[in-house]
């Protein structure tokens, strides 16, 4: 199949076929190899990319900035708090203004509708760097990392158990990615924090076509035979008022060596989108303990730093997967890249 994604936005994996996702993954692996060989990319020469941020970021911002620069383009970081975006200028007007300067727009913020409207009104490719509903660039990096870490299995045979708060944007994004790729996904957490019905329904409708298994459970038996144990922080940005409630709900869902053992898979890998609360070296963890007497660490330090953890390999692959998205949708030529 001839894959052509030129000019397409990247808002959610639900917009892409399994063949298109596989193409992006293969491209990401090839671009990573090129970088390791010291080959400079030129696919984005002459391209200007706006990086529009409502929410703070480390990996997403760095990955986009370096990706654009390494392929010959020019990234512009725009902090929404110091611009007119959404305050003195509507999203629709801002989209049309930015499109006069830029060939593509990345957005990281709150509402999924905002990134959708940017795509609707700008007329240039728009990239979802995270919203409250989805985080598709992270999942592409994660799928790439699983292919590297578990090469003996195709993605369609991989079982991912997402542990903890399973109604957040990362859980949604994982459901969508697994549904598209025919994988087995389990949202494992307290019933109060199971995926929202509308998100689960989207994933299950897609799974009916791909053969994926998408389910939610509060039974630890669901951990059996997992290939990947995945978690995220228990308190997302904007939810700081829920510290005590979340800590009490999720105290039995901290990722520990005992939980990994319940998979009965000695090669199970631990993944996390980062940043992670795994020790006492962050102000947030210490403040939560001092003020409320609760432990908000979603993973033990032993697991985070242990032999099953591939979190930093995963973080590094944000660069290559985002570069693949940009090259595929905006690149003027793909030198040395086979479709």
Image (tube, rainbow, N blue to C red):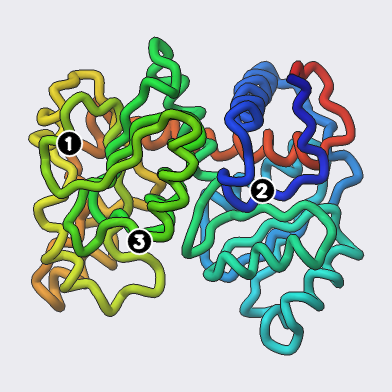
Q: Position of residue 208 (x, y in %)?
A: 44, 36
Please say if 220 is above or below 106: above
**Separation of marks 3 and 2 at Cα, in angstroms:** 23 Å
What residue is shown with label 1? Answer: 222
Q: CA distance from mark 1 to mark 2?
A: 32 Å
Which class describes the residues within 10 Å of circle 1: few (<14), some (14-19), or many (20+)?
Answer: some
Judge whether residue 76 can be spotted in this image.
no
Q: Position of residue 310 (x, y in %)?
A: 36, 31
Q: Nearer the viewer, residue 52 or 77?
A: 52
Q: Which mark is residue 10?
A: 2
* Mark 3 or 2, closer to the camera: 3
The tag earlier along the polypeptide, 3 or 2, is 2
Q: Quadrant of the C terminus?
A: top right
User: Residue 326: percent from the left, percent from the top?
Assistant: 73, 41
| N-term-proximal mark, 3 vs 1 | 3
Q: Residue at x 32, y 34 (%)?
A: 160
Name the element at disc 1: helix
Would residue 103 be found to the left or right of residue 50 on screen? right
Q: Tell me if residue 44 comes above or below residue 339 in the rendering.
A: below
Q: For the point 55% across and 70% down, which residue is it?
A: 111
Assign a secondary structure to mark 3.
Answer: loop
| Image quadrant assignment for residue 78 | bottom right
| Residue 235 visible in the current orientation | yes
Comparing labels 1 and 2, the label whose residue is closer to the camera: 1
Task: Give the labeled residue for mark 3.
Answer: 196
Picture quarter containing residue 5?
top right
Q: Is residue 160 left or right of residue 204?
A: left
SS of the residue at dot 2? loop
């Amino acid at each position: 199949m001839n894959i052509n994604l030129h000019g397409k936005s990247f808002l959610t994996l639900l917009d892409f076929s399994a063949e298109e996702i596989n193409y992006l993954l293969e491209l990401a692996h090839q671009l990573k190899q090129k970088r390791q060989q010291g080959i400079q990319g030129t696919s984005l020469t002459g391209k200007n990319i706006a990086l529009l941020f409502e929410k703070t970021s480390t990996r997403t911002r760095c990955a986009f900035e370096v990706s654009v620069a390494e392929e010959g383009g020019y990234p512009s970081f725009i902090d929404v708090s110091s611009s007119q975006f959404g305050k003195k200028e509507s999203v629709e007007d801002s989209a049309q203004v930015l499109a006069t300067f830029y060939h593509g727009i990345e957005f990281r913020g709150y509402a999924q509708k905002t990134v959708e409207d940017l795509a609707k009104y700008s007329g240039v490719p728009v990239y979802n760097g995270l919203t409250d509903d989805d985080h598709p660039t992270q999942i592409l990096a994660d799928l790439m990392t699983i292919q590297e870490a578990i090469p003996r299995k195709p993605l369609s045979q991989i079982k991912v158990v997402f542990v903890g708060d399973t109604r957040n944007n990362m859980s949604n994004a994982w459901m969508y990615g697994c549904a598209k790729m025919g994988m087995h996904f389990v949202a494992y957490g307290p019933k109060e924090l199971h995926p929202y019905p509308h998100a689960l329904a989207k994933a299950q409708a897609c799974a009916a076509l791909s053969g994926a298994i998408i389910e939610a459970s509060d039974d630890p038996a669901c951990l059996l035979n997992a290939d990947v144990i995945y978690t995220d922080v228990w308190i997302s940005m904007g939810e700081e008022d829920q510290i005590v409630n979340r800590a009490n709900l999720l105290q039995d869902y901290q990722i520990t060596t005992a939980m990994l053992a319940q998979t009965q898979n000695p090669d199970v890998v631990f993944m996390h989108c980062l940043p992670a609360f795994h020790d006492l070296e962050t102000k947030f963890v210490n403040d939560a303990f001092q003020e409320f007497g609760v432990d908000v660490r979603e993973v033990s330090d032993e697991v985070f730093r242990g032999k099953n953890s591939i979190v930093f390999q995963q973080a590094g692959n944000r660069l290559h997967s985002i570069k693949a998205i940009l090259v595929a949708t905006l690149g003027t030529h793909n030198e040395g890249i086979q479709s």
